[in-house]
Image (cartoon, rainbow, N blue to C red):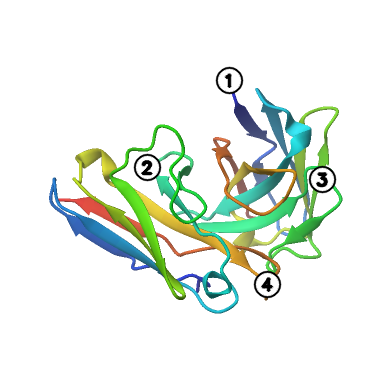
């Protein structure tokens, strides 16, 4: 069981907006540690999507954004496209574990 | 271009050892913290270990503490993961990933292609 909790799956039609939640606790997200998001396309290595809560690396479209509230962070994807179909993971630091932690991952299906 | 290439994976019997390598190129390796992350077949990502840019600090996931050792040779631009007392549950694709400069924990902005480790008798 992952320290950070994500829904196993979400889905949406092309053009729609979907959100993926990532819920932690007072030892990680609630302690104000930065949260990062990764996209993993089938059969490939993960790719950094969002860093430091809501910044995008060069090349990541602004359709991807994140927001934080308390012990949860939410990734939002607007204007859903077929190429967005992938697994998405959140990551943060956990002070009680003295290590990095990942969410269990969310599979996004574009209908 | 900026690149990480893992090697050293394979099939190993339970209780045996294996050493993974990760060759870095296209950036100043000695400036960045480096991580190992693994992914069991059909499962999610699991953070394994981090080493500071200068090797001074190392941290491990509880699942590998005492069995795995992360190290680096900045003169060879190479990261290592020494895995001892391997168990079936260590079977996974192992990725090396670049962390932030002059630190350890942070965003993992560059990933290798991964190397498969299978622990089986």
Residue highlighted by disc 2: A41
Write the residue at 71% across / 51% down: B104
Q: Judge depth for marks 4 and 2 and give the one in front.
A: 4
Q: Which chain does the numbered disc 3 sit on?
A: B
Residue highlighted by disc 1: B1
On whether disc 1 and disc 3 are found on a single subunit, the reply is yes
Q: Residue B86 lies in what quarter of the image?
A: bottom right
Residue A92 position (above or below residue B9): below
Secondary structure category for the residue under label 1: loop
Left/right placement of residue A35 relative to residue B88 reads left
- Discs 3, 4 touching: Cβ within 8 Å: no
Name the image quarter holding the N terminus of chain B.
Answer: top right
Q: CA distance from mark 4 to mark 2?
A: 29 Å
Q: For residue B71, which numbered disc appears in the image?
A: 3
Q: CA distance from mark 1 to mark 2?
A: 21 Å
Q: Judge depth for marks 3 and 4 and give the one in front.
A: 4
Few, some or many residues within 10 Å of mark 4 (<14, 14–19, 20+): some
- Discs 1, 2 touching: Cβ within 8 Å: no
Write the residue at 77% across / 42% down: B80
| Relative image position of residue B39 (x, y in whole percent) | 53, 53
């Amino acid at each position: 069981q992952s320290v950070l909790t994500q829904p196993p799956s979400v889905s949406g039609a092309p053009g729609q907006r979907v959100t993926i939640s990532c819920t932690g606790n007072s030892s990680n997200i609630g302690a104000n540690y930065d949260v990062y998001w990764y996209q993993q396309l089938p059969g490939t290595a993960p790719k950094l999507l969002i860093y430091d809560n809501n910044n995008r690396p060069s090349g990541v479209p602004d359709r991807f954004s994140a927001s934080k509230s308390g012990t949860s962070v939410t990734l939002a994807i607007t204007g859903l496209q077929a190429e967005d179909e992938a697994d998405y993971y959140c990551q943060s630091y956990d002070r009680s574990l003295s290590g990095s932690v990942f969410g269990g991952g969310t599979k996004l299906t574009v209908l | 271009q900026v690149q990480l290439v893992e090697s050293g994976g394979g099939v190993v019997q339970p209780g045996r050892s294996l050493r993974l390598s990760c060759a870095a190129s296209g950036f100043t390796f000695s400036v960045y913290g480096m991580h190992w992350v693994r992914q069991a077949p059909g499962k999610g990502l699991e953070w394994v270990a981090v080493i500071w840019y200068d090797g001074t600090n190392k941290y491990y996931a509880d699942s590998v503490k005492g069995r795995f050792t992360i190290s680096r040779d900045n003169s060879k631009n190479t990261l290592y993961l020494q895995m001892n007392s391997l168990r079936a549950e260590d079977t996974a694709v192992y990725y090396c990933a670049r962390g932030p400069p002059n630190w350890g924990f942070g965003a993992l902005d560059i990933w290798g292609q991964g190397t498969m480790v299978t622990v089986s008798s």
